Amino acid sequence: MKLEIAVLSGDGIGPEVTTQAIKALDAIAHAFDHTFIFKEALVGAIAIDKTGNPLPDDTLQLCANTDAVLFGAIGDPKYDNDPSAKVRPEQGLLRLRKELGLYANIRPVKAYETLLDKSPLKREIITGTDISIYRELTGGIYFGRKHLNEEGTVASDLCEYSKEEIERISHLAFKAAQNRRKKLTLVDKANVLESSRLWRKVVTEIATAYEDVTLDFLFVDNAAMQMILNPSQFDVILTENMFGDIISDEASVIGGSIGLLASASVGNTCCMFEPIHGSYPQATGKGIANPIAAILSAAMLLEHFNLIDEANSIKNAVEKALELNLTTPDLNNINPLTTEKVGDFIYDYILNPEDSNMNFENIHVGQSTII
Ligand code: IPM
Ligand code: MG
């Protein structure tokens, strides 16, 4: 298969982790005889620095005209600490999601057997956790009307959803549940919010078309608690934009590091793949950022194009790295590898998965050679 992929590596650790994701895709192209063409473009704080715009027109054009977008991270503390900044890196990402119509953000959360003791949660609580979060991505409070009064003393953000916006992601979530453990939990705040009551009504109607899927509901405050008390009860979680943002960061604790969580954002015509972590500015250039979330996002890209064996090849390499503790300091503070070395191992393993031929000893001293 030939795919043109826009690469928006963005800010902070974005470029370092995206380089490793590209490397994994290069290994797949080699091993499975595909052609992946990468085209880079600016987004986020770096785009503001260079062009004044967090999403330059060229970048948007490129994304709209390629098969997929591989996204790194955005954000810079100089904007976080300045609430009066009119132009912000995050606007680039939000506009990109909206313009490309990426209404569904899929975030898988898994407790890897080999990492059960790395999580701050107890092993017996997280064992068996395997969740797929379907977060609505182009509506709700993120995109509703914003207002600040002239005195700068009263502000509001409108949370608005239409039936159509709820329906299209709900169908994707129900279909996903049909291919999994057939359970869907709608997370909302229907005891307080009118928009949540609309979600419940629409999702309940849609459920009649998916009789094999059990639907249940949880208020978001309770869901936040259940995520920590008993995460393995969840299969597919369906939720609106902001609840999904918060719940997915919380869920990342289960896996042991937010540096493991990948995501796919899909719409009717475009698709984008990004780690759920941010730009982690303190780590920039230090080689300590975990590239696995970015690499697993590349695996989700392959899955999206139905390249299932290829995606599994990346996932197997990642699982091997985790099993051998060939990871960055977030998961291994005794004998960590750099971002690049983790990427090297995964690259090598994709090309040659035979354990016996890999010189694991050398990896820790910086030579991930195949012998
Ligand atoms: C995410 C991020 C973004 C969001 C930020 C960077 C705008 O936190 O993708 O989860 O809130 O959606
Ligand atoms: Mg977030």
Image (tube, helix red, strand yellow):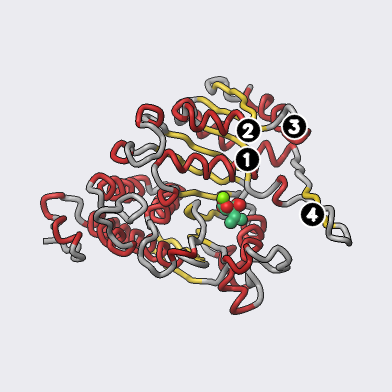
Q: Which one is in front, 69 or 321?
A: 321
Nearer to us of marks 1 and 3 is 1
What residue appears at the point 50 percent right and 49 percent down from the top-left corner?
Answer: 264
Assign a secondary structure to mark 4. Answer: strand
Q: Which residue is mark 3?
A: 198
**Image side of residue 332 versus residue 297, left or right:** left
Disc 4 residue type (three-letter): Lys
Q: Mark 2 vs mark 1: which is more N-terminal?
A: 2
Tell me which amino acid carries mark 2.
Answer: Val
Marks 3 and 4, how far apart in space?
Answer: 21 Å
Where is 309 relative to 363, above or below? above
> SS for tag 3?
helix
- Residue visible at 33% across and 59% down in the picture: 24
Q: Could one spot residue 269 in this view of the protein?
A: no
263 w.r.t. 79: above or below: above
The residue carrying pointer 2 sits among few (fewer than 14), some (14 to 19) or many (20 or more) residues within 10 Å by Cα, namely some
Circles 2, 1 touching at the beta carbon (< 8 Å): yes
Q: Nearer the viewer, residue 136 or 32?
A: 136
Nearest-to-viewer mark from 3 and 4: 4
Q: What amino acid does circle 3 point to? A: Leu
Q: Quadrant of residue 96?
A: bottom right
Residue 194 or residue 283, whichever sits in front: 283
Which of disc 4 and disc 3 is earlier in sequence? 4
Q: For mark 2, what is the residue?
A: 220
Name which residue lies at 47% across and 26% down: 230
Q: Which numbered disc, 2 or 4, marks the residue that appears first in the sequence?
A: 4
Measure the alpha-carbon separation of dots 1 and 4.
Answer: 18 Å
Q: CA distance from mark 2 to mark 1?
A: 7 Å
Secondary structure, mark 1, is helix
Residue for badge 1? 243
Q: Earlier in the sequence, mark 2 or mark 3?
A: 3
- Residue at mark 4: 146
